[in-house]
Amino acid sequence: MQLVIDFASDKSMYLQIRDQIVEAIAGGALEQGAALPSTRQLAADFGINFHTVNKAYDLLRQEGFIELHRKRGAVVRVAKPVESDFLDQWMLRQRTLLAELLAKGEASEAILDRCAKLLQSLGKRGT
Amino acid sequence: MSLSLIIFVIMLFLMPSMMPPTLPFGVRVPHARISDPTILKVRSNYRFMLSLATVLMVIASAVLGHTLIPTLTLGVSTALFIVLSYVCYYVAHRRLRRLKERENWYEDQQQAAVTVLEQPRWTGRALWPWIIPPLVVTATTILIGVWRYPSLPARMPNYYSMSNFYSANGAPHTWVARSVWSVFSPVLLQMAQIVVAIAMVLIMPRIRRELDPANPDGSAHQQRVFRRRMAFVYMIFALSLNTTVLLDSLFIWGLARRAGVGLIIGLWAFPTLAAMIVAVIFYRTGQLGARVSVSQPPAETGLTYRDDDRYWKGGWFYVNRDDSSFFVAQRFGFGWTINFGRPAAWIVVAAGVIPTVLLPLFLTVHG
């Protein structure tokens, strides 16, 4: 699976990395327990600073998507029930996103439909 | 003129066709501009200038040949040629860079960096067997040396004196006393090759691949092929060098005559054959596998390499402190070079250059 850094994007590089890894895990391209490249290796592959990748991995670890082992390095975490604080934060973000569309006049069914399509597209990748 | 030098000159002529299309003369260009007509013009100019440089070198070596011994003539004219060929490259490089800036080639281009995560990752384990042939040659040299040591005379030809191999009647000029050091020091050269080969097998899988954002999977395939072939090329080089040392040692240990057929074949034909094989492999592979065919690339991603010319000083030396990589791909040539922006690079250079330059000097003086 590919990881892409778009240098022209407004999104900072570490967030681009983090988002793509999350999507890869969601789609199954990165399975539970799969090893990620070391921070140094990934930074070298992209030709960017080691600290940028470190920031991305750190964020992923804090959010509970990956685990950092001493020997194996960064590993996709094995499925566990979603942590309640993560869920709370997620719900807050989702609430705002939904409100944006509702505020623009979009109907609920249309919004749900969009969400269903997005979920489908996330799941298809990597299977 | 040595055949290996001829092969080297030919490779320099062909070099522009062997680089990735997005890297003409060490200048990064977007995919949209690969076929720009100026690039072709610059290429013909380069080849024309290179022809002049070659002619100059031939004239210089003919002139010098009258006053200097053959080795020195070869050395000086080769050095002259290397400097001139760099000038040819730099002129082409500069011209393309200026053009790119003037016409703003990177406007509206989506610059990206891509990597492919493979599970499992290539560890290069399949490369280990390549070390065996040079290792066998080294072991053979040691065994023969050990067997021969007791019967060696007290005074032996000095291995490190170049004049010994180029004297008129083959009779050595300088001598050295027999000792474990004087007999076995050439073996150190062989072992150095083995060490470098091992280092290469360990390090190569970790070197970044610089995948093409417009075709990541295709370039990943090309790189895999390229790395396998580079390991093979290095094995040929190590084997050739170690065999040369073995044959030289046979001469020094009195087991082979100076003008013997075996020695001539070994010291001339073998390295030349090795050079030809390596040249053919490079020609068919291209830098980073640029000439390895890939199946139809998938739909264009619309992405292109990041423009990082500013890190390449003189179009040749890569200096980028922000880049974690230690080894990066050469922009004009085969294989890799070091990132001089990393402090460790200077340590490596010192560790590599100092022994290479000082060791032979030291040995010549003390030999």
Image (cartoon, rainbow, N blue to C red):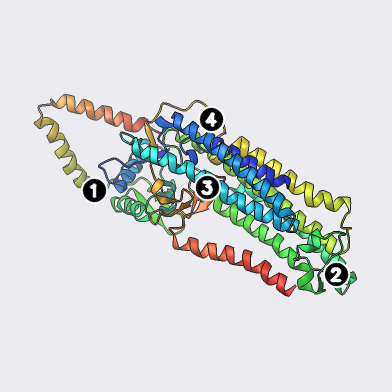
As measured in the structure, the alpha-carbon distance from the residue carrying label 1 to the one carrying label 2 is 75 Å
Residue B337 location (% of width, % of height): 52, 52
Image point (44%, 47%), residue name? A45
- The residue tagged 4 is B294
**Residue tagged 3:** B87
Estimate the x, y position of residue B257 in percent, counting from the top left.
89, 58
How far is the residue under mark 4 from the one under mark 3?
A: 34 Å
Amino acid type at mark 4: Val
Tell me the CA gap for discs 3 and 1: 60 Å
Q: Chain of mark 3?
A: B
Q: Does dot 1 land on a helix, a strand or a loop?
A: helix
Q: Chain of mark 4?
A: B
Question: Label 1 crowding class (10 Å Cα cut-off): few <14, some 14-19, many 20+?
Answer: few
Q: Can marks 2 and 4 be said to lie on one chain?
A: yes
Q: Amino acid at mark 1?
A: Phe
Circle 1 or circle 2, nearest the eye: 2
Residue B361 vertical placement versus B220 (above, below):
below
Q: Chain of mark 2?
A: B
Residue position for label 1: A86
Q: Residues within 10 Å of mark 2 (few under 14, many from 20)?
A: some
